Amino acid sequence: MSDKLTVYHGSPKIIEQPLFGAGNPHNDYGLGFYCTESVELAKEWACSTETDGYANRYTLDLTDLSVFSLTDGKHHILNWLFVLLENRRFRVGGDVARQAKLYIAENFAIDYRCYDVIKGYRADDSYFAFANAFLNNTISVSQLERAMVLGKLGEQIVAISEKAFGALTFVEAVPAPKEIYLPKKLARDTAARAEFQAEKGRGSVLSEKYVLDIMREGWKNDDARLQRVVLG
């Protein structure tokens, strides 16, 4: 990352001054201000069935900020899943899924809350469905990792600390008409789900590793087999 980034926050409103401590604590990485470097993605995220939106544009000055990246090649898909399970409201059904959630928390935890900024994948509804499928032992860890690129949702950059909020400078609000960007948003999600269904049919239950295998074989955070499914 360069010292200064141009980032966009999709919203139905113009937000000139993001408010630290406000918002939904059950987003992917907890309470924070969620942005993307893609103005087109921000426009899609801004629109709903009821309203047009805005891609609020900011400069984020990273000087003196600590940045944690889940996609720097040093972390794997189960680290990302641990973070997601810590923050998102997640209805876990069945014994396998409940035990898998506990196992991931005990063995694949990472310390991410002490940073000013977090960078990583965005888990919209379709991605959340992929994570649920993995916990319920219906897709493998490799399939979960490959699913992260489906739909090309890109990465999000999240201001977490009060210091990071202070490093955001509002530039402008770019209009996002819902008649243009809502269909794009829905098409992206539909494509991700369709590609995921195709991906599910490609794996072999004999050669792929599922969450039951990971628990039974006692995989840990530094397991060499996880180096093949690092995020990046």
Image: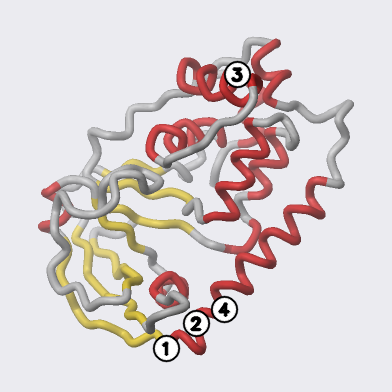
Label whose residue precedes the other's in the sequence (1 or 4): 1
Label whose residue precedes the other's in the sequence (2 or 3): 2
Mark 2 and mark 3: Cα distance apart in space: 42 Å
Mark 2 and mark 1: Cα distance apart in space: 6 Å
Q: Disc 2 on helix, strand or loop?
A: helix
Q: Amino acid at mark 3?
A: Asp
Label whose residue precedes the other's in the sequence (3 or 4): 4
Q: Nearer the viewer, residue 98 or 70?
A: 98
Dot 2 corresponds to which residue? 181
Marks 3 & 4, CB-CB < 8 Å contact: no
Estimate how packed mark 2 is, as few (under 14), some (14 to 19) or many (20 or more) residues with alpha carbons within 10 Å: many
Q: Quadrant of residue 177?
A: bottom left
Mark 1 and mark 4: Cα distance apart in space: 11 Å
Q: Nearer the viewer, residue 147 or 190?
A: 190
Q: Amino acid at mark 1?
A: Pro
Q: Amino acid at mark 2?
A: Tyr
Q: Residue at x 51, y 79 (%)?
A: 182
* Residue 180 % position (x, y): 51, 88
Estimate how packed mark 4 is, as few (under 14), some (14 to 19) or many (20 or more) residues with alpha carbons within 10 Å: some
Q: Which mark is residue 58?
A: none
Q: Which mark is residue 223?
A: 3
Mark 3 and mark 1: Cα distance apart in space: 47 Å
Marks 2 & 1, CB-CB < 8 Å contact: yes
Taking the image as shown, residue 38 lies to the left or right of residue 209, namely left
Dot 1 corresponds to which residue? 177
Q: Amino acid at mark 4?
A: Lys
